[in-house]
Image (cartoon, rainbow, N blue to C red):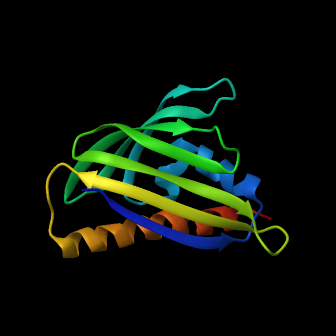
Amino acid sequence: MADRVIEHTTIGAAPDAVRAVLLDFTRYPDWAPDLKEVEVLSTDEEGRGTSVRFRAAGFGKSTSYTLSYDYSDPTVLAWTLTEGDITRKLDGFYELLEGDEPGTTDVTYQLEADLIVPIPGFIKRRTQGRIMHTALRELKSRVEQRTP
């Protein structure tokens, strides 16, 4: 059974600035320390990655997975797992909405994951915390460093 986690944060930059960092897939290893390599396999007519392969450090070894991205909602960057060596499901999204303060973005991050091999609950919770930390706090730091 898949586990679902959801968190929210506010980033001190406009949604377009946040989206630009999220769409720059090959730069993810610069701000997401567990990601070792990212390769964009295909793009849409606007040059956005539609199929992206990731290699990450996980559970003391390297793991690989490929995500398919959906841009049908302009406020959401959504993905689904198409291939994974230890994952059965790794689907999620970032929702980017104008914040209450001018020049800010309210970000919702949701991830639903299911691994092929079972792992103890305490390891799963620690891993979820690390993923959420990178997904939101490291993203926030990266965007706010790049925003004048």
- Percent from the top left, x then y, of residue 39? 45, 35
- Percent from the top left, x then y, of residue 52? 46, 36
Q: Quadrant of residue 127?
A: bottom left
Residue at 69% in and 29% down: 46
- Percent from the top left, x then y, of residue 137? 54, 71
Residue 43, relative to residue 19: is it above or below?
A: above
Say whether residue 61 is left or right of residue 41.
left
Is there any visible trace of residue 130 in the rendered image?
yes
Is there any visible trace of residue 137 in the rendered image?
no
Residue at 53% in and 32% down: 50
**What is the residue that sits farthest to the right in this orientation?**
102
Say whether residue 105 is left or right of residue 112.
right
- Percent from the top left, x then y, of residue 76? 63, 50
Residue at 57% in and 71% down: 8
Residue 26, relative to residue 35: is it above or below?
A: above
Q: Quadrant of residue 14?
A: bottom right
Q: State the residue in front, 42 or 56.
A: 42
Residue at 80% in and 65% down: 148
Residue 135, relative to residue 26: is it above or below?
A: below
Quadrant (top left/top right/bottom left/bottom right) for the N terminus:
bottom left
Q: Quadrant of residue 97?
A: bottom right
Say whether residue 106 is left or right of residue 82.
right
> How many numbered tags mark residues here?
0
**What is the residue that sits farthest to the front in this orientation?**
1
